[in-house]
Image (spheres, rainbow, N blue to C red):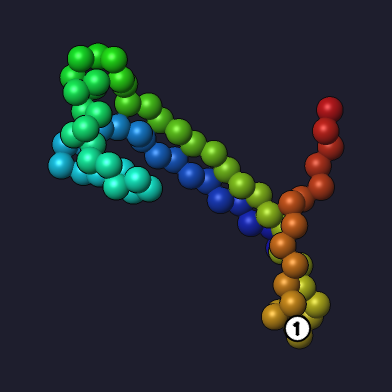
Amino acid sequence: MRITVHAYDRYTFNNGSKDIVTGEPDASNGRFAQLGWAKSFNTSGSLVRDVSWTMGNPGKAEVTEPLRQRW
């Protein structure tokens, strides 16, 4: 089985919110957005993985990166 996960996010300063990882309030850096020194931006990416297992034994599934040619 091949699984592809696509992710999209918009990094922005939201007054009243905080950073998920650090817990730092957005208001701490929000002044940079107000001054024009910082801008919101979009990020995106994808991840592909192959999952294989022996029929009747799904508990021993193996997850690997798919083989692909490198040019």
26 sits to left or right of 71: left
Q: Quadrant of the C terminus?
A: top right
Q: Nearer the viewer, residue 28 or 41?
A: 28
Which residue shows up at 77% across the image and 73% down it? 53
Which residue shows up at 18% across the image and 19% down it? 34
Q: Residues within 10 Å of mark 1 (few under 14, many from 20)?
A: few
**Residue ranking furthest to the top:** 36
Give the x, y percent position of residue 67.
81, 47
Vertical position of residue 33 compared to residue 14: above or below? above
Q: Please identify the quarter of the rendering in which residue 60 is found.
A: bottom right
Residue at which label 1 appears = 57
Q: Quadrant of the N terminus?
A: bottom right
Which residue shows up at 35% across the image and 34% down it? 11
Which residue shows up at 61% across the image and 47% down it? 47
Q: Please identify the quarter of the rendering in which residue 46 is found.
A: top right
Give the x, y percent position of residue 10.
36, 35
Q: Amino acid at mark 1?
A: Asn
Vertical position of residue 54 compared to residue 9: above or below? below
Give the x, y percent position of residue 8.
44, 40
25 sits to left or right of 69: left
